[in-house]
Image (tube, grey):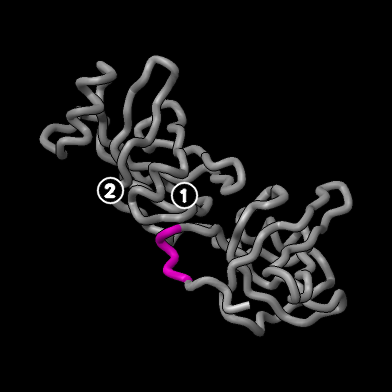
Amino acid sequence: MGEVKGPPATPVAGQGNAVEAARLEDGVEVVEIAGTIKWFDVSKGYGFIVPDNGLQDVLLHVTCLRAGGYQTAYEGARVHCQVLKRPKGMQAFHILSMDESTAIHPSLLPQRTHVQVVAESDWERASVKWFNRVRGFGFLTRGEGTPDIFCHMETLRRFGFTELRPGQTLLVRWGYGSKGVMAAELRPDGPTQGVPPSPH
């Protein structure tokens, strides 16, 4: 398989006041790169990009993603972005474009458990009641008077999560399975999702 070569890392000029301000304030060089998402963990809030031009991995923070209108980045996706060359390493500053056609989407990964849950609800906002990584499951709640939603570790992994923290909010589609009400699909909660609050 031949490698796709991206554009050379050249200083970006005239890309807007924000980039210019970053360059002036921090005294750092701003370059433009193309690369591939190595991994991104929505729970930790960051991940890394592998540049095509052979430079070191680029840190990708969730705030950079959200500023570009994205909530997460899938492994294998192609990304074109502006990067700050800081003394501690390179960090993505502005996402110019992202192509997910080459990404490994979590919903396409095989389920390694025998539990199959079909989503029967719309997207609803829920919070984590508790989650135990060692036991491999936990529960979400949509509020008082609603049944808890069972959430398996494999469901988390399929949708890009590595762990859940008590009180953390996320969006869930659920269905009925062997454990009662069970999480079928998950995605990060965020201002760009446009999902109304749960009516419950």
Query: Which SS does the magenta portion mostly show?
Result: loop
Residue type, numbered disc 2: Leu
**53 relative position to 184: left or right:** left
Q: Is residue 108 visible?
A: no
Q: Which residue is mark 1?
A: 1
Q: Vertical placement of 123 versus 38: above or below? A: below
Residue farthest to the bottom, as pictured: 120
Answer with mark 1 or mark 2, whichever residue precedes in sequence.
1
**172 relative position to 81: left or right:** right
Horizontal and vertical percent for residue 129?
76, 57
Q: Is residue 6 visible?
A: yes
Q: Secondary structure at mark 2?
A: strand
Horizontal and vertical percent for residue 149?
76, 70
Q: Vertical placement of 88 versus 181: above or below? A: above
Residue type, numbered disc 1: Met
Q: Secondary structure at mark 1?
A: loop
Instruction: Measure the alpha-carbon separation of dots 1 and 2.
Output: 26 Å
Q: Residue at x 75, y 60 (%)?
A: 154
Horizontal and vertical percent for residue 61?
46, 39
